[in-house]
Image (cartoon, grey):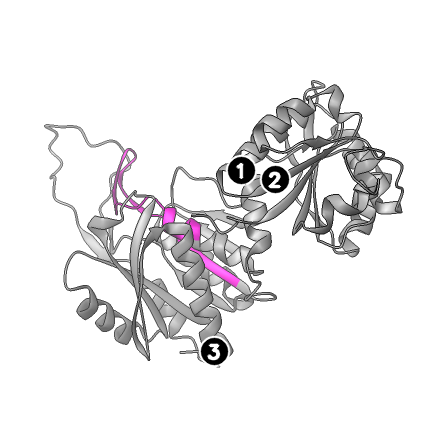
């Protein structure tokens, strides 16, 4: 079950080649349990047919301001009154200009002007159209009016040019819509998250590392951003894309992660240490690849890496610190001991054999009030529960 199941959304489609992506967006939303109603500009019907959108949503697609199917001929009023969000995807430069200036000359622009619910725009246009000062002024006006503008992203465009202007991919837009509906319990907070493994070189091609996909840490970063926080993600090497709206800093070794954390610490309200940092680094690493049968001994000399979480928690005025513990047995015993040793107000613990690389996890939170089992669920759902717990402790004035 997703966080948007049962939501009612009006999907508006304007003219542009990216209109084909609206079909996939509608499919994903319906799959997530959303009630999707579609309204299209006349130009949009040149790129994708209303029949396609009706087939995907199970509801008629609306295109005409004077559609006689609306009893009082006021479709611009009725179509949005039971909706919780209007999403325009793609939002062309022309439509953005209309929305910014209050122009209402067709069904979709009139619906937007007469709305009572929030509005989200996903721009899609040529790079030069996006960069044009007129478009930027219009976007700024809309943002000042409280409209959510998501994207665009950079990349190859249908016109053959490259740059900003591509509409976000449908899956990313679903994430943005999910984020929109999350409670903004960390609004105004600055959150620093570490995620993934670190790699400690043995030679140029071999490393000592921990098994970590980074999925839990990335889910936490996404959930914090959904909650309204400004999020920085310091990540070891993983095969994941940074969540939308999250600033990512890539590192390899524990020392590099430590330096990145120190650099961000002065502008941090909450520190969430999810990374599986290697406990040791190799002091006698070879500068050349070690060959089998060579005279070089195969033994490695190790020294401890810095304890990043303990360093942060031990500062004179630390941010609110959250630790993670992956155990293989005696979860509660080891987790409580680690929380005490690190002197952190909150620690999340799980059994490693149940979570590594998986899409789901089972987490228990430990704080001054005891243990709080979050159950087994997709990692993003657990991350959202964790963020709500953090927000509750912050509201209660708990710092360490």
* Residue at screen point 17% across, 28% down: 291
Is 210 one of the magenta-colored residues?
Answer: yes
Alpha carbon of mark 3 to alpha carbon of mark 2: how far?
Answer: 48 Å
Residues packed near mark 2 inside 10 Å, few (<14), some (14 to 19) or many (20 plus)? many
Number of numbered discs visible in the structure rendering:
3
- Please tell me which residue lies in front, 352 or 5: 5
Residue under pointer 2: 36
Q: Secondary structure at mark 1?
A: helix
Alpha carbon of mark 1 to alpha carbon of mark 2: how far?
Answer: 7 Å
Q: Can residue 253 be seen at all in this image of the molecule?
A: yes
* Residue at screen point 88% across, 46% down: 102
Nearer-N-terminus badge (3/1): 1
Q: Nearer the viewer, mark 3 or mark 2?
A: 2
Residue 198 vertical placement versus 192 (above, below): above
Residue 56 vertical placement versus 273 (above, below): above
Q: Which range is magenta?
A: 191-219
> Left or right: where does residue 284 sit relative to residue 226?
left
Nearer-N-terminus badge (3/2): 2
Residue 97 in percent (x, y) is at: 85, 40
Q: Quadrant of residue 257?
A: bottom left
Alpha carbon of mark 3 to alpha carbon of mark 1: how far?
Answer: 47 Å
Residue under pointer 1: 30
- Please tell me which residue lies in front, 158 or 260: 158
> Left or right: where does residue 260 sit relative to residue 74?
left
Q: Can residue 231 be seen at all in this image of the molecule?
A: no
Residues packed near mark 1 inside 10 Å, few (<14), some (14 to 19) or many (20 plus)? some
Q: Secondary structure at mark 2?
A: strand
Q: Are marks 1 and 2 in contact (CB under 8 Å)?
A: yes
Q: Nearer the viewer, mark 3 or mark 1?
A: 1
Residue under pointer 3: 317
Q: Secondary structure at mark 3?
A: loop
């Amino acid at each position: 079950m997703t966080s948007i199941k049962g939501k009612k959304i009006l999907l508006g489609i304007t003219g542009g080649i990216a209109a084909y992506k609206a079909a996939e967006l509608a499919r994903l939303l319906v799959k997530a349990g959303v009630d999707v109603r579609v309204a299209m500009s006349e130009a949009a019907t040149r790129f994708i047919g209303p029949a396609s959108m009706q087939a995907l949503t199970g509801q008629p697609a609306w295109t005409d301001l004077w559609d006689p199917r609306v009893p009082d001929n006021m479709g611009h009023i009725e179509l949005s009154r039971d909706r919780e969000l209007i999403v325009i995807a793609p939002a062309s430069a022309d439509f953005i200009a209309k929305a910014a200036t209050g122009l209402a000359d067709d069904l979709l622009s009139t619906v937007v002007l007469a709305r009572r619910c929030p509005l989200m725009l996903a721009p899609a246009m040529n790079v030069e159209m996006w960069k044009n000062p007129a478009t930027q002024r219009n976007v700024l006006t809309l943002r000042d009016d409280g409209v959510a503008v998501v994207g665009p992203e950079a990349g190859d465009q249908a016109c053959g040019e490259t740059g900003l202007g591509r509409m976000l991919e449908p899956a990313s837009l679903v994430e943005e819509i999910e984020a929109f509906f999350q409670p903004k319990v960390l609004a105004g907070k600055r959150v620093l998250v570490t995620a993934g493994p670190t790699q400690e070189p043995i030679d140029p091609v071999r490393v000592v590392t921990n098994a970590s996909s980074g999925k839990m840490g990335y889910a936490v970063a996404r959930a914090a951003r959904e909650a309204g926080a400004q999020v920085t993600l310091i990540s070891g090497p993983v095969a994941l894309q940074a969540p939308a709206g999250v600033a990512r800093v890539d590192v390899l070794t524990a020392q590099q992660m430590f330096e990145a954390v120190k650099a961000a610490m002065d502008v941090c309200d909450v520190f969430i240490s999810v990374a599986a940092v290697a406990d040791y680094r190799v002091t006698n690493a070879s500068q050349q690849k070690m060959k089998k049968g060579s005279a070089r001994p195969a033994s490695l000399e190790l020294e401890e890496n810095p304890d990043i979480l303990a360093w942060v928690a031990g500062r004179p005025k630390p941010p609110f610190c959250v630790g993670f513990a992956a155990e293989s047995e005696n979860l509660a015993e080891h987790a409580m001991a680690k929380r005490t040793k690190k002197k952190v107000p909150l620690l999340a613990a799980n059994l490693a054999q149940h979570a590594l690389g998986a899409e789901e996890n089972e987490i228990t939170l430990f704080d001054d009030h005891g243990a709080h089992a979050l159950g087994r669920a997709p990692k993003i759902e657990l991350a959202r529960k964790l963020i709500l717990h953090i927000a509750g402790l912050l509201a209660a004035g708990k710092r360490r």
